[in-house]
Amino acid sequence: MSNSKGSALIFTLMIILILTVLGVSILELSLTEFKISSSYGNDVLSRYAAEAGLDILKSEFNTNLLNNLKSNAQKIIDSNYDKGNGTYKISMDQLYSLIFNDTKNYLYSYVFNKYLNKGNVNLGNTGQIYNISSISFNQEEGMQYNIHIETIGIYRNIKSYGHADIILNLQASGNPITISSWIIDNTPPSN
């Protein structure tokens, strides 16, 4: 009889051991799921920060800025046009080059430099940070230009990157801004 009392104790201890292992396994699985979910959320918030950097710079191209750019271009055209002969005083390539340089200088002076020199910028109290890391400005043809923007979004040491190409066409009759590429990913810019 005393043997059966000992086997019940061993059986009970085995059941407790099995339930403990099962409970620890379920707890570990739950913690893993929580870590994955938290990491995904942090990645999404860093992507939002990278996109915010692109949006903030794109918002600079408001009606007032675009009117100033078009007005400056028209002044250059008018100053190089000979009304008496009905011809331009310089070649069209030279004219477009003057307008390109004026537009580029204007944008760097009044828009780009204030963002390029800012460094990391907090987005409110969320812990999200964006940084506009580079801006390039190139002439495509005539008075059409490509503005390439690179941003970094950071949230809890997770980085995401924004890459955008914006076309500025000063000859366009409607909205002179077109977005040709807008990508948010985990690929650092290739400088």
Image (spheres, rainbow, N blue to C red):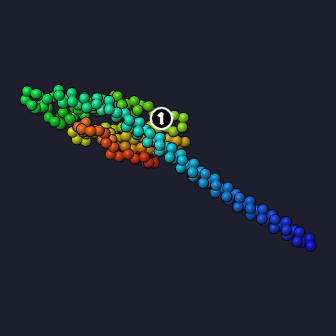
Q: Position of residue 122 (x, y in %)?
A: 50, 34
Q: How many marks?
A: 1
Q: Is residue 6 left or right of residue 53?
A: right
**Residue 8 appears anywhere in the view:** yes
Characterize the local packing of mark 1: few (<14), some (14-19) or many (20 or more) Cα atoms within 10 angstroms: some
Residue at the right extreme of this rendering: 1
Q: Residue at x 21, y 30 (%)?
A: 74
Locate residue 107: give its quadrant.
top left
Q: Which residue is mark 1?
A: 120
Residue type, numbered disc 1: Asn
Q: Position of residue 89 (x, y in %)?
A: 12, 30
Locate residue 83: give its quadrant.
top left
Q: Is residue 6 left or right of residue 93?
A: right
Quarter of the image where the N terminus is located: bottom right
Residue at the bottom extreme of this rendering: 1
Q: Residue at x 87, y 68 (%)?
A: 6
Q: Residue at x 89, y 72 (%)?
A: 3
189 or 124: nearer the eye?
Answer: 124
Residue at the left extreme of this rendering: 85
Q: Position of residue 189 (x, y in %)?
A: 40, 44
Secondary structure found at label 1: loop
Q: Residue at x 45, y 33 (%)?
A: 119
**Residue 190 appears anywhere in the view:** no
Locate residue 173: give its quadrant.
top left
Q: Is residue 86 left or right of residue 102?
A: left
Quarter of the image where the C terminus is located: top left
